[in-house]
Image (cartoon, grey):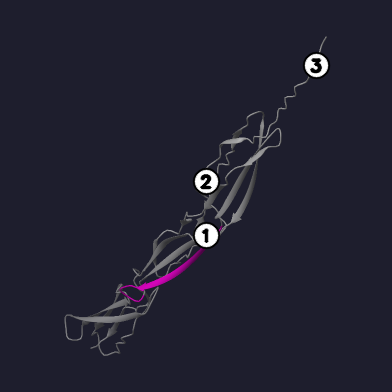
Amino acid sequence: NATTDTQTITIVDTTAPVFTYVPEDYTAECSDNHPMEFATATDNCGEVTITVEEITYNGLCVGSYSIYRTFTATDDCGNSVVSETQVITIVDTTTPVLTIPADYTAECSDEHPMDEATATDNCGEVAISVAEFTFPGSCPSEYVIQRLFTATDDCGNQSQATQTITIVDTTAPVFTLIPADYTAECSDEHPMDEASATDNCGEVDIDVVEEIIGGDCVGDYTIVRTFIATDDCGNATTDTQTITIVDTTA
């Protein structure tokens, strides 16, 4: 004789997975590596699938923004858990790298190249501005130009550097006309012509110094005329005219 009865054991999975690791918040420069680590989780009974939702919020400039990452762990039975949000803050605090033209010294009459500067940035575009300041030197043709270059990136980070251009006047004037030497009878006219000169950068003053050298008699002598051409910066050139006066008339 037999009797039967049944016991039913119902196995359920109502326990959500548990996160064992969620990446920490961090702040990084826009040009650095931005590791996008994944979360991990375990489940009491089976496998776990982890998905991530990422939302990016723009900042005040191209190199500044925030990434919000939320992880969801789901087991085979559809139990799920949502992690705390990881916040990755991307910033741009690096100034551009500015390359400017080299300093130089040039003669006032030479070319004075005003070359442009260049710049690079770690994360975006760069705008370059230049301000020029001129400082007088010790004479009209000498001066100093200072060029202040400013490189600004999209986030307002700036680099500055100054180029110095020194303009000098070391070139003496050039005579364009010196009266020719001549010999004249003591009773003739003795023209005292003027000299002329030009300068590479400014005005020229011409002074003349005359020296009379006696000869063998009253009617014989020599006039040596030394012309001195001086520019605004004190550079000078000299040249000489010789006038020989003779008495050959009985």
The kind of residue tagged 2 is: Asp
- Give the CA separation, mark 1 to mark 2: 23 Å
- The mark nearer the N terminus, 3 or 1, is 3
Indicate whether residue 138 is drawn in magenta.
Answer: yes
The kind of residue tagged 1 is: Cys
On residue 155, the disc is 1
Q: Secondary structure at mark 1?
A: loop
User: What type of secondary structure mainly makes up the magenta span?
Assistant: strand
- Give the CA separation, mark 2 to mark 3: 62 Å
On residue 4, the disc is 3
Q: Is residue 33 above or below residue 206?
A: above
Whole-percent x and y of residue 237? Answer: 31, 73
Residue at 24%, 81% (x, y): give it.
Answer: 209
How many residues crowd mark 3 within 10 Å: few (<14), some (14–19), many (20+)?
few
Asked if the residue under mark 1 is in contact with the one under mark 3, i.e. CB atoms within 8 Å, the reply is no
Indicate whether residue 90 is drawn in magenta.
Answer: no
- Give the CA separation, mark 3 to mark 1: 82 Å
